[in-house]
Image (cartoon, grey):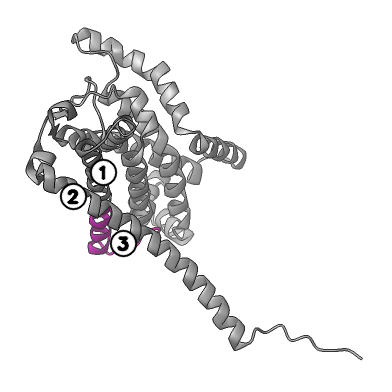
């Protein structure tokens, strides 16, 4: 006698599954909240001792003399991130357009594989290659201007640009491919050329995803430590392209091991500033997208 198997979940099973998923989601939110609380508490404690204005606007960092000004670190981080995006975004967008609309299937598949490999390379290898290949070339420019040759902000920006390039390419290509094909076909039918259709129709329609790629690239660039530490020169001075520089993340990693007392609290405050800085970037980008009526990935 055949028996009918009921594969439909009952109400209790659905509630249990929903509860499990809710708990995992709550765990992720809780982790973010705890990290934020720790950074806020430690950062506010240090700022109370050092002073907000001397800490954020001070130009001298010298723990031996209780000087904890991080303005050079902030400006160096902003400059390096901006330069890396400025270098990587045009390259990433052009490559994404080529993969989406010009490359053959075999060529596109090979290039995507190489891009995935590029994205998986450890950051320390990027720093090593930058120290071997990029820093000596920048050193030639430094010799012309008789500048220190222990790394530079320009070298760090170039390395960061290479590191964020795979993210910009992958997300931008996915956004371009997500645009309905009828947009492209309609533009061609109206007499536009292939390039006109891409630049005037497809790219504007995919701008939400492209901006999302930029946000991810900024997050990767501003949070990078090891590669930047190997090529930037790590001097706590105001940023100039061909001079050594120290970024926020590098300041923490270099001095944490031997720090103590107020020095360590100042490094924790740098982590708090970095957290706020990243948060403000995401809030600003989201507000910009909402004002333009664009959603990420569309």
Q: Is residue 27 visible?
A: yes
Is 116 inside the magenta-drawn segment?
no
Disc 2 designates what residue? Answer: 45
Q: Residue at x 11, y 42 (%)?
A: 50
Relative depth, front residue between 153 and 96? 153
| Residue 230 x %, y % | 36, 24
Counting every numbered tag in the picture gives 3
Task: Specify start and end residues of the magenta stretch as a single range.
Answer: 279-298
Label 1 SS: helix
Neighbours of disc 2 within 10 Å: few (<14), some (14-19), many (20+): some
Marks 3 and 1, the one that precedes in the sequence: 1
- Mark pair 1, 2: CA separation: 9 Å
Disc 1 designates what residue? Answer: 268
Q: Nearer the viewer, mark 3 or mark 1?
A: 1
Query: Dots 1 and 2: beta carbons under 8 Å?
Result: yes
Res 81 → quadrant: top left
Label 2 SS: helix
Q: Is residue 281 visible?
A: no
Neighbours of disc 1 within 10 Å: few (<14), some (14-19), many (20+): many
Relative depth, front residue between 201 and 46? 46
Marks 3 and 2, the one that precedes in the sequence: 2
Disc 3 designates what residue? Answer: 294
Q: Is residue 14 shown left or right of residue 296?
A: right
Position of the N terminus, as image quadrant, is bottom right
């Amino acid at each position: 006698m055949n028996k009918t198997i009921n594969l439909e979940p009952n109400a209790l099973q659905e509630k249990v599954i929903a509860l499990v998923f809710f708990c995992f989601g709550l765990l992720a939110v809780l982790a973010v909240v705890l990290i934020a609380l720790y950074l806020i508490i430690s950062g506010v404690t240090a700022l109370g001792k050092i002073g907000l204005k001397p800490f954020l606007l001070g130009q001298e960092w010298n723990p031996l003399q209780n000087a904890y000004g991080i303005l050079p670190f902030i400006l160096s981080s902003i400059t390096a991130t901006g330069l890396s995006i400025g270098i990587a975004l045009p390259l990433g967008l052009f490559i994404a357009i080529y993969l989406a609309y010009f490359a053959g299937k075999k060529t596109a598949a090979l290039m995507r594989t190489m891009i995935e490999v590029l994205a998986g390379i450890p950051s320390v290898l990027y720093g090593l290659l930058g120290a071997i290949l990029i820093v000596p070339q920048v050193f030639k420019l430094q010799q012309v201007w008789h500048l220190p040759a222990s790394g530079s902000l320009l070298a760090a920006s170039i390395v960061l640009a290479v590191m964020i390039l795979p993210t910009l390419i992958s997300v931008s290509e996915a956004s371009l491919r997500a645009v309905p094909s009828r947009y492209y076909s309609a533009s061609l039918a109206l007499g536009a050329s292939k390039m006109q259709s891409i630049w005037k129709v497809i790219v504007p329609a995919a701008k939400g995803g492209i901006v999302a790629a930029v946000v991810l690239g900024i997050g990767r660039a501003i949070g990078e430590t090891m590669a930047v530490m190997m090529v930037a020169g790590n001097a706590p001075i105001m940023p100039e392209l061909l001079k050594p520089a120290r970024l926020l993340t590098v300041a923490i990693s270099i001095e944490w091991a031997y720090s103590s007392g107020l020095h360590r609290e100042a490094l924790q405050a740098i982590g708090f500033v970095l957290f706020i800085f990243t948060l403000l970037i995401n809030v600003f980008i989201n507000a910009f997208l909402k004002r333009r009526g664009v959603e990420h990935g569309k």
